[in-house]
Image (tube, rainbow, N blue to C red):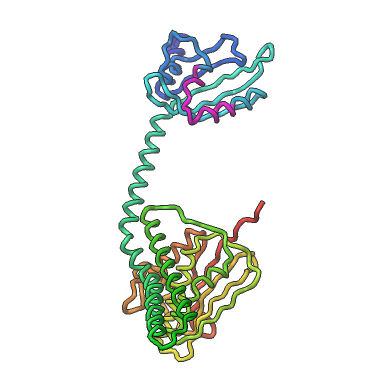
């Protein structure tokens, strides 16, 4: 069967309708010789009796896309080559169509710019992508709500520590004030600690609420050693509870890091708390917990928490970061899992190594802050 030229035109129009694709040609400056295929009229909702014009397309651009497209065209008309644009077109009936336009630019007689290209209506694809994004967001929200109880349980001992500190300092104030001649500077110091610990408890709760509401992690530039000094009172409480010595080995002149300070402090407190509990359970009489910062060969800030306790039993190392896995009689099995999740959000990892000659050592890296330009 032999097709006539008319048949070929019909096939082309049908193909364009199926693909939601139209073609166009226009000149800059406008010489009145422009072309739109029938499919362009349909996708833009323009009356076929109206003369084709690129000005008509610009007039229908979505306000949020107009400046970007105008800037792209202003740059393109100075030369030749290709131009690709993606924009929303608002039809006269108010319907918004998503258009992907591709043009080949060349110089016509007289020096005018010739733009020949295609307009592709991708509204259905964009709508499907947006629906998929909304569905994924709903699934993420369900997942966050499902793990809310887990997060609350895993963070409970971080809250218990500042609350216990507040209680201890309050009792100290009572004892001091009950003496005939109270040491007022000591009272003032204890009250200051109460205020500091109350603020820390509030920050932890604020971060927990942020996780529930899916707020972005609040990262700031900070000196890594300051993260440890800021929670020293909490670390010392754990060391005293386990009758262990707390040793700091902080390298000087470390680069600044870009982290969520409260979250990283929670990781450090959790690791020291775990070390203290391990020493208590082992009945160590000369326990020692070391918090160390250093700069590795790759220029990364390394933080480690180690102890001289019994370390992990054989077979435990492979499961220690699993949610709900715990070696403690009253543990939730979430502390290390949550700590690892926090560090993964910082593009870091939490790892375990045996501490020589004995004990456990947990290590992670902090991302260095970019150099100021």
Looking at this view, is 201 or 83 the one in front?
Answer: 201
Question: Would you say residue 63 sits in the magenta stretch?
Answer: yes
Is 16 placed left or right of 147 in the picture?
right
Question: Would you say residue 102 sits in the magenta stretch?
Answer: no
Is 258 placed left or right of 156 in the picture?
right
Quadrant the N terminus occupies: top left
> What percent of the width, then of the height, locates residue 58?
51, 21
> What percent of the width, then of the height, locates residue 109?
67, 12
Q: Residue at x 54, y 85 (%)?
A: 357
Q: Residue at x 44, y 14 (%)?
A: 38
Q: Residue at x 33, y 67 (%)?
A: 153
> What percent of the width, then of the height, locates residue 350?
49, 68
Q: Is residue 139 above or below residue 199?
A: above
Looking at this view, is 18 or 210 the one in front?
Answer: 210
Residue at the extreme right of the image, as rendered:
110
Q: Is residue 249 above or below residue 80?
A: below
> What percent of the width, then of the height, locates residue 150?
33, 64
Chief secondary structure of the magenta span? helix
Looking at this view, is 198 or 249 the one in front?
Answer: 198
Q: Is residue 10 above or below residue 77?
A: above
Looking at this view, is 38 or 62 the one in front?
Answer: 62
Q: Residue at x 65, y 24 (%)?
A: 80
Magenta stretch, residue numbers: 56-72
Quarter of the figure with residue 226: bottom right
Q: Is residue 15 above or below residue 197?
A: above
Residue at the extreme bottom of the image, as rendered:
285
**Numbered marks: total:** 0
């Amino acid at each position: 069967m032999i097709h006539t030229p008319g048949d070929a035109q019909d096939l082309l129009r049908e193909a364009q309708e199926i693909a939601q694709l139209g073609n166009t040609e226009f000149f800059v400056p406008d010489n009145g010789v422009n072309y739109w295929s029938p499919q362009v009229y349909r996708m833009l909702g323009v009356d076929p009796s109206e003369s084709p014009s690129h000005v008509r397309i610009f007039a229908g651009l979505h306000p949020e896309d107009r400046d970007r497209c105008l800037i792209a065209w202003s740059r393109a008309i100075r030369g030749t080559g290709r131009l690709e644009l993606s924009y929303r077109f608002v039809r006269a009936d108010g319907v918004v169509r998503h258009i992907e336009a591709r043009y080949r630019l060349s110089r016509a007689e007289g020096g005018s710019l010739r733009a020949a290209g295609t307009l592709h209506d991708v509204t259905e694809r964009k709508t499907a992508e947006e629906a998929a994004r909304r569905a994924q967001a709903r699934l993420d929200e369900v997942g966050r709500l499902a793990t809310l109880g887990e997060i609350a349980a895993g963070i409970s001992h971080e809250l218990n520590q500042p609350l216990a500190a507040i209680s201890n300092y309050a009792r100290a104030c009572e004892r001091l004030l009950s003496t005939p001649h109270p040491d007022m500077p000591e009272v003032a110091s204890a009250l200051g600690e109460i205020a500091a610990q109350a603020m820390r408890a509030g920050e932890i709760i604020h971060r927990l609420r942020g996780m529930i509401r899916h707020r972005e992690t609040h990262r700031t530039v900070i000196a890594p050693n300051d993260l440890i000094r800021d929670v020293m009172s909490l670390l010392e409480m754990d060391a005293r509870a386990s009758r262990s010595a707390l040793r700091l080995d902080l390298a000087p002149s470390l680069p600044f890091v870009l982290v969520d300070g409260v979250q990283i402090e929670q990781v450090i407190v959790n690791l020291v708390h775990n070390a203290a509990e391990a020493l208590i359970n082992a009945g160590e009489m000369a326990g020692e917990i070391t918090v160390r910062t250093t700069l590795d060969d790759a220029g990364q800030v390394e933080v480690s928490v180690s102890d001289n306790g019994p370390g992990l039993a054989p077979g435990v190392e492979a499961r220690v970061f699993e949610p709900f896995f715990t070696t403690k009689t009253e543990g939730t099995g979430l502390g290390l899992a949550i700590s690892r999740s926090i560090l993964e959000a910082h593009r870091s990892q939490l790892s375990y190594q045996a501490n020589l000659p004995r004990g456990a050592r947990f290590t992670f890296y902090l991302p260095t802050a970019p150099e100021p330009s």
